Amino acid sequence: MEKGSIKISGLSYGVNGKTIVDDVSFEIKRNEFLCIVGPNGAGKSTLLRLLARIINPTAGHILLDGEDISKHEAKELYRKISFLPQTSYFDFPLSVLEVVLTGRYPYLGIFESESEEDIRRAEDCLSLVDMKGFSRRKITTLSGGEQQRASIARVLAQGTDFIFLDEPSSHLDIHHKFALMELLGSLAREGKGVAAVLHDLDLASRFCDRILVLENGRVSALGEPSHTLSKELLSSVFKVRGSWDPGRGNLLVFR
Amino acid sequence: MPAGKKTLSVYAALASLLVLTVVACVSIGAVSVPFDEVIRIIAGKLLWLDTGAEIGKSQELIVWDVRLPRVLLAATIGGGLSIVGAVMQAMFRNPLAEPGILGWSSGGAFFAVLAIYTGIHQKWFLLLPLAAFAGTLLTAYAVYGISRYRGFVENTTLLLCGVALGTLFVSLTTFVLSISNAWSMKEMLFWIMGGVDSRTWTHFAMSAVPVLAASAMLLFYAKNLNARLLGYETAKTVGIDIEKTTKHLIILSSFIVGASVAVSGIVGFVGLIIPHSVRLLIGVDHRRLLPASFIAGAIFLPAADLIARTVMSPQELRLGIITSFIGVPFFVFLLRRNFSGREIL
């Protein structure tokens, strides 16, 4: 058994005769923060939904520690991987703590309630996303950014080795965007495998360890940001110009 | 989360109110029976006590044979429809979902009327609720199937489809009743506007067993329903098997609605009014919400029935008229809040 990674090989997904993810192969390691970028409609969210087993591939495999994720029992799988969807729904006034505690559900039996330890863990995760003191607030009364951070806390409360996030920085102000990226980086340093779909190339290039560029459902580049996001690639895939700032080591993108 | 002090006090208040409502509903009517007499008659019957000659036979008849089965039946149905409303709202993540609005009750009523029209209900007493269950289940699956697209239930389609199928089944029920010579307008009103009048212990037994059993089983799905509130993808990735448990939830809910409709016709809006009101009291967590909704529904429907039989006494109103009078403004309020983009309640 190969421990410590998720291996994706020959992964494809299509619907109504249209291929959305096309023969994708790569690896997500523990201790790594991987960003998935690409133009609109490149298949980024679909790829992440395949990794989280929301949908099943039409071809290929996703191996978690050497075993195909389709073979895992649901609760067991989601004790190892967690997922932040692109859209979270808050139509009913759950408290913020109740939202975060759903992250502990994979660990609980049918009639089992969350323990004091679960509640403490949920509170800790809220602190990590700068939401200490929000536990009793109704989720429906919060701003979009606060709701997004509560959702991220829910994902963290799941305590999984692999964390997949679809546009986690959406709705966040610039301060919380940076704080989130630092948090995701530090989680990777602690041994977790983190994969996030991002639109902001500057943000992705500053914080992630590797970057995967998806174009028309295929991997067009994968590697360290400074090597991967070349002028040629930015121009051909994203239709923008860009250059690396040698002083600060980050990417500058412009039309 | 562990039950807090507030939760326990709400439960205690609801339980006390339930007992009080049952006694009051049995006591009040064309012939009023004092509270202590009511308690003495019920206790006497339950504990096989000799209540003595001071209680008249007519009072005993009114309390034990006429009013108590009616009140307990209303309580059972009210509880059942309320728990189903709470389940449907979470299952479809739609605050307006309810067995009456989504057409489930109409489907059940049509099959019940069909069972009576063809006479198959006389072969075995449980065939009537079973027919209503089949009709409810069929409608539930039709509405769910039509509004489901790539695993997602589209909310507007769900409501419109429910309303359309509900109207169709009401029309079919009216058609069957109108071609049947033996049935009167009163009977037609019974099925379409619901009621618990002239109900006996047999009707109570027929509905109480399935309603209580299925309601108890729904409690197993409380955390499942909590997770569903956050959306299909979130629920799935905290370990919920959406496809499988949706089937369970629809079957159990249909069982309750079928067993209710078979003995009381279509009683609308209970599943809308009660869960939303209880959420205000006790929060959204279904581990607290489901039992509390059952008790609150069991208080509400006998009280509504009391209004139905006393407000224009000696004439009795249909129970569905009372629940609609309360439910429709509530529905409009929820609809306005929903479409104005603000959160519900």
Image: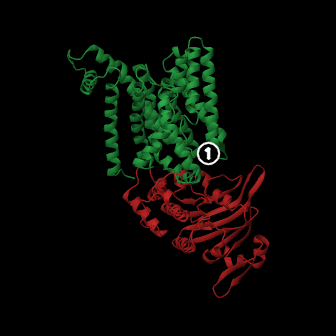
Chain colours: A red, B green
Which one is nearer the viewer's eye here, A17 or A240?
A240
Instruction: Please provide percent x and percent y for residue A176.
Output: 54, 72
A20 horizontally vs A115: left or right: right
Q: What quarter of the picture does the C terminus of chain A occupy?
A: bottom right
Which one is nearer the viewer's eye here, A142 or A195?
A142
Residue sitting farthest toward the front: B312
Q: Residue at x 29, y 18 (%)?
A: B60
**Disc 1 is attached to a residue of which chain?**
B
- Residue under label 1: B155
Residue sitting farthest toward the top: B182
Which one is nearer the viewer's eye here, B30 or A251?
B30
Instruction: Please provide percent x and percent y for residue A111.
Output: 42, 46
Residue B151, relative to residue A230: is it above or below?
A: above
A207 horizontally vs A254: left or right: left
Question: Is residue B166 at least partly visible in the picture?
Answer: yes
What amino acid is labelled 1 in the image?
Asn
Residue A9, relative to residue B211: is it above or below?
A: below
Residue B153, relative to residue B55: is it above or below?
A: below
**Occupied quadrant, residue B135:** top right
Instruction: Please provide percent x and percent y for residue B163.
Output: 61, 35
Q: Residue at x 46, y 67 (%)?
A: A131
Instruction: Please provide percent x and percent y for residue B289.
Output: 43, 45
- Dot 1 crowding, Cα within 10 Å, few <14, some 14–19, many 20+: some
Residue sitting farthest toward the bottom: A247
How many badges with numbers are in the image?
Answer: 1
Q: What quarter of the picture does the N terminus of chain A occupy?
A: bottom right
**Occupied quadrant, residue B94:** top right
Assign a secondary structure to mark 1: helix
Question: Is residue B93 at least partly visible in the picture?
Answer: no
**Occupied quadrant, residue A233:** bottom right
